[in-house]
Image (cartoon, helix red, strand yellow):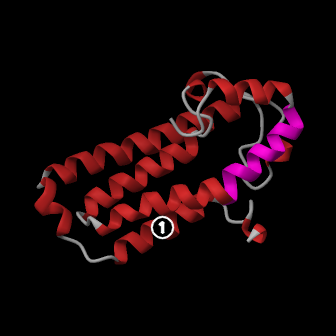
């Protein structure tokens, strides 16, 4: 399945995952956490969008590519700010957004969406990116990986 590596932009994966989650019958989660799911879901979605925006801003400030399809075009290895907490703040933000969406949908089954997203993104986006960045940045990237977790 190597043919899927770095092919589908992560925002497209998020939209497809969100649509799949929306198609799952709702109502089961409301029994578990009640109306708080609507508030918590909204907060998580906003947090996810803010995290993505902040990370994207850091790419723009560093004047490096934000394209997840062409990580080899990166001109700067960003290791400050939110990148000190996670090597993949944008993917983490997307996963948090999907978790919030599952809560808004009030569907326990929809909670599988963020899990599927993380699984797919790790295998077909993050691992290929890491191979490329390791080749490009060598010891600097290895040192960064040893200090900063992939997700959290």
* Residue labelled with disc 1: 17
Counting labels gives 1
SS label for mark 1: helix
Residue 129, percent from left and from top: 75, 48
- Out of 85 and 60, give the one closest to the viewer: 85
Residue 23 to residue 109: above or below: below
At 62% across and 53% down in the image, what residue appears?
122
Residue 89, percent from left and from top: 56, 38
User: In the displayed image of the protein, which residue is found farthest to the front?
Assistant: 146
Q: Is residue 13 left or right of residue 132?
A: left
Q: Bounds of the magenta span?
A: 124-137
- Out of 116 and 15, give the one closest to the viewer: 116
Look at the magenta stretch and give its main secondary structure.
Answer: helix
Question: Dot 1: within a 10 Å radius of its alpha carbon, few (fewer than 14), some, or many (20 or more) residues?
Answer: some
One can see residue 61 in this view? no
- Out of 14 and 2, give the one closest to the viewer: 2
Q: Which quarter of the image is occupied by the N terminus?
A: bottom right
Residue 6, percent from left and from top: 74, 59
Q: Is residue 66 left or right of residue 28?
A: right
Q: Quadrant of residue 110?
A: bottom left
At 68% across and 65% down in the image, what residue appears?
8
At 73% across and 28% down in the image, what residue appears?
62
Magenta residue check for 129 = yes
One can see residue 6 in this view? yes
Residue 60 to residue 140: above or below: below
Residue 51, percent from left and from top: 49, 37
Magenta residue check for 37 = no
């Amino acid at each position: 399945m190597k043919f899927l590596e770095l092919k589908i932009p992560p925002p497209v994966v998020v939209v497809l995952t969100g649509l799949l989650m929306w198609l799952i019958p709702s109502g089961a989660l409301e029994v578990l956490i009640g109306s708080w799911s609507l508030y918590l879901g909204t907060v998580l979605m906003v947090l996810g969008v803010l995290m993505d925006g902040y990370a994207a801003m850091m790419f723009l400030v560093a004047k490096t590519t934000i394209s997840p399809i062409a990580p080899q075009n990166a001109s700067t290895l960003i290791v400050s700010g939110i990148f000190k907490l996670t090597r993949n703040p944008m993917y983490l933000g997307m996963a948090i957004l999907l978790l919030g969406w599952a809560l808004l949908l009030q569907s326990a089954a929809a909670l599988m969406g963020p899990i599927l997203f993380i699984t797919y993104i790790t295998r077909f986006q993050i691992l290929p990116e890491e191979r490329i960045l390791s080749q490009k940045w060598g010891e600097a990237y290895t040192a960064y990986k040893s200090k900063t977790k992939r997700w959290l």
